[in-house]
Image (spheres, grey):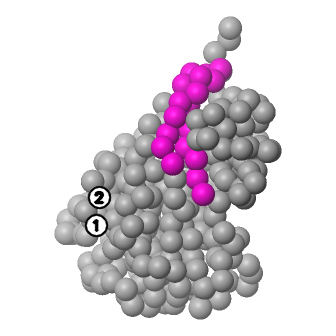
Amino acid sequence: MIPALRSIVDPAPLAALAAREYGLDVTGCVLLRSLVNDVYRLDTPSGPRVLKLYRTGHDSAGWEVALAAHVGAGVAQGVPLTTGHPAGVLQAAEGPRAFTLWEWVPGGKPPKPRTDELYHRFGAATALFHEATAGFPGRPGFDVGSLVEEVLARVPDAADRALIAALAAEAGRRVEAEELERGVCHGDVTLDNIHVAGDRIVFFDLDRAADGYRAADLSPVAATPQWPAFLAGYRKVRRLGAADEAALPWLDVLLRIDYLHFHLYAKPAMRGTESLREGWVDENLEQLRAARTLLPSARGSGGR
């Protein structure tokens, strides 16, 4: 048999497995999304559920369920986190793959236009998530600095490579020099990972959650026009220190390098090289080019 990198599991036997493992009466199963992990909708007489199938070698399934349970117990009513059920393992073509069962997330993606009122609530919900992770033993996050050389190997333009190397080195120095707040971070605080159900904001997808700099969760929003509203919502619930706020541009640099690595390596392996033409690589390169003004050399030459 030729080894497989990843497989798409037939929904029918997956439905039977879920029924057996979780004691459900499963009347239907359909694949919703396939990227880093595969997400299936299970239909049951009591309503839909979600079965999340993790890629081979990904060992966060049990930790993700435990974190969701911890956060769900600590989050104020009205800003819940979807809850999960214990993990199992199935044998796929590429090897063992963990799976977890999740409650169906109510509501839907925030509709456009995305208002300041939405971002104010989003900021408050993010702060509540941070508060609720207190006391939970975080798993180590990964070091973005370890990705830089691989990113540089696939960035064709020499000027871009030099800029990324300089930004990564400076970001590492700036972040390490400050005593920034650390704790369990969601890891992907964007509107893609929340549902709005009436006056409730529901978080889901803790796949990237890990110990890290708390302010890193805020950096995806910090460069948007809605940042003041988000920050006001966050500060309504908990404090954001001056050093943490000042570090946001540098944390965003590290995040962009992380994104570049994903779109240059992991995503083409899963989706093929045509994914390189989707625009995500160019978008993150543009953001890093705009960050040139953060460098001391740029400021010293009049750049701003």
**For residue 181, above or below residue 173:** below
Element class at badge 2? loop
Residue 288 place in picture, x, y as percent: 51, 63
The type of residue carrying mark 2 is Phe
What's the CA distance linking mark 2 and mark 1? 6 Å
Check the picture and name the quadrant holding the C terminus: bottom left
Is residue 130 found inside the magenta-colored segment of the image?
no
Q: Give the percent coordinates (x, y) of residue 197.
A: 65, 77
* Residue 280, visible in the rendered structure: yes
Q: Quadrant of residue 174?
A: bottom left
Direction top: furthest residue: 1
Question: Residue at position x 68%, y 8% from top?
Answer: 1
Give the residue type at disc 1.
Answer: Ala
Label of residue 136 in the image: 2
- Residue 301 visible (yes or no): no
Closest to the observer, 20 or 104: 20
State the residue at coordinates (79%, 45%).
Answer: 27
Q: Is residue 23 left or right of residue 296?
A: right
Q: Secondary structure at mark 1?
A: loop
Check residue 92 for magenta coloring: yes
Q: Main secondary structure of the magenta part?
A: strand
Q: Position of residue 282 (x, y in %)?
A: 65, 57
Magenta-tinted stretch: 85-103
At 40% from the left and 47% from the top, the residue drawn is 63
Residue under pointer 1: 134
Q: Which mark is residue 212?
A: none
